[in-house]
Image: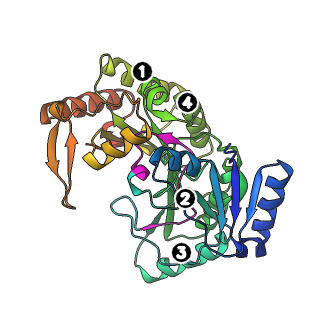
Amino acid sequence: MFKPKQVLFEKDALEYPLGKEIYDKFKKENIQIVKLNANRVPSIKSDDLKEKYSKAKQTLVIGVRRSFKFQTCKPSAHYQLPLVTGCMGQCEYCYLNTRFGNKPYIRTYVNVEEILNQAKKYIEKREGITIFEGAATSDPLPVEPYTHGLQKSIDYFSRIHNARFRFVTKYDNINSLLDLDHKGHTTIRFSLNTEKIIKNHEHFTSSAKNRIEAASKIYKAGYPLGFIIAPVFLYDGWKNEYRKLIEDISKAIEPNNSNDITFEVISHRYTLKAKEVITKIFPNTTLSMKEADRKFKYGQFGYGKYMYTKEQINEIEEFFTKEISRIFTDKSIKYII
Ligand code: SF4
């Protein structure tokens, strides 16, 4: 569970029952609380990215969501569901690291019902099923014990026939979600990697073992379940370790119908901008980022990424297709890139 060092309350957040509930909880736990006089949080004034990062990762902002324009979230969903932004985890390759502004705190909202009402408007505007992603700019599970935002969303989407909800996590505190009558409308995905990669690069997240145990409970509770194995790294013994990971998943889940578990596999890639940020925040990182070992590929937004070579990506594809289909089925593989 996330224990912030300090919690900032925007002025209006305390007008909401959930805001007061969260306030009382942190007060009891003697966590430093700052009541802001306005609905604006201060910037972190520092040129030292490492210091800024560390402060942001330990600060929780409790606010009121005012913008009801939801961002699109292609290709995995239609819209982002803005329950939380930021994350307590310190994964070296986190996509959030390059999106650092001057207020990079973990922020969550007390007006969850208003956010869900807005989702309804988007659903009504579209034909067919509308999908919302709850983890586009965060991992929402660490703050769930305070806000119950996922619980409320799962409950909300269970009552809507033409909408679906999904989120992905690297954490394991899912017990409060197990008894919900979700109607299969929420897909929960676990992002996984080998123990070696998690230990070296995914700081302050749950172990693979705990994530897999949580996934097993989620599957038994009847939720559609997915795994994102990412980022895949090629290192000495990678095949044995990723094979073991897939076998561990299978042993814990004991799938009764392998088709309803999905796998997404993404090989590691990085931009020079990401490398610059990572080496500033984690100066001792051992993350594999040597341009000479990679192939440069232009992206659609004008900047390029350093990927594994075509031959290496083929090898990754061949390996995961074989190993996943051996235990699950090839229908459970959504993509390997
Ligand atoms: S758990 Fe996910 S969102 Fe959090 S730091 Fe790691 S990669 Fe980023």
Which residue is painted at 49% across and 71% down in the image? 162
Specify few, some or many for label 4: CA neighbours under 10 Å numbering under 14, 14-19, or 20 or more.
many
Q: Amino acid at mark 3?
A: Ala
Q: Nearer the viewer, mark 2 or mark 4?
A: 2
Position of 2 compared to 131: left or right? right
Kindly tell me whether residue 334 is visible in this rendering: no
Amino acid type of the residue tagged 4 in the rendering: Ser
The answer to whether mark 3 and mark 4 are in CB contact below 8 A is no
Of labels 2 and 3, earlier in sequence is 2
- Give the distance between the C-alpha atoms of the residues marked 2 and 4, in whole angstroms: 31 Å
- The dot on residue 244 is 1
Which residue, given by chain and number where applicable, does mark 4 sit on?
207
Instruction: State the SS at label 3.
Output: helix
Q: Are marks 2 and 1 in contact (CB under 8 Å)?
A: no
Q: Which of disc 4 and disc 3 is earlier in sequence?
A: 3
Q: CA distance from mark 2 to mark 1?
A: 43 Å
Which of the two discs, 2 and 3, sits closer to the camera?
2
Q: Is mark 3 within 8 Å of ligand 1?
A: no
Question: Is residue 335 visible to us here?
Answer: yes
Of 111 and 122, the residue lying toward us: 111
The circle on residue 337 is none
Closest to the observer: 177 or 236?
236
In this rendered view, identify the residue nearer to me: 190 or 111. 111
Query: Mark 2 highlights which residue?
Result: 44
Quick one: label 2 or label 1, which is nearer the N terminus?
2
Range of magenta residues: 79-97
**Lateral position of residue 135 relative to residue 159, left or right:** left
* First along the sequence among labels 3 and 1: 3
How packed mark 1 is, by other alpha carbons closer than 10 Å (few <14, some 14-19, many 20 or more), is: some
Q: Which residue is mark 3?
A: 119
Q: Between tags 3 and 4, which lies in front?
A: 4
Q: Are marks 3 and 1 in contact (CB under 8 Å)?
A: no
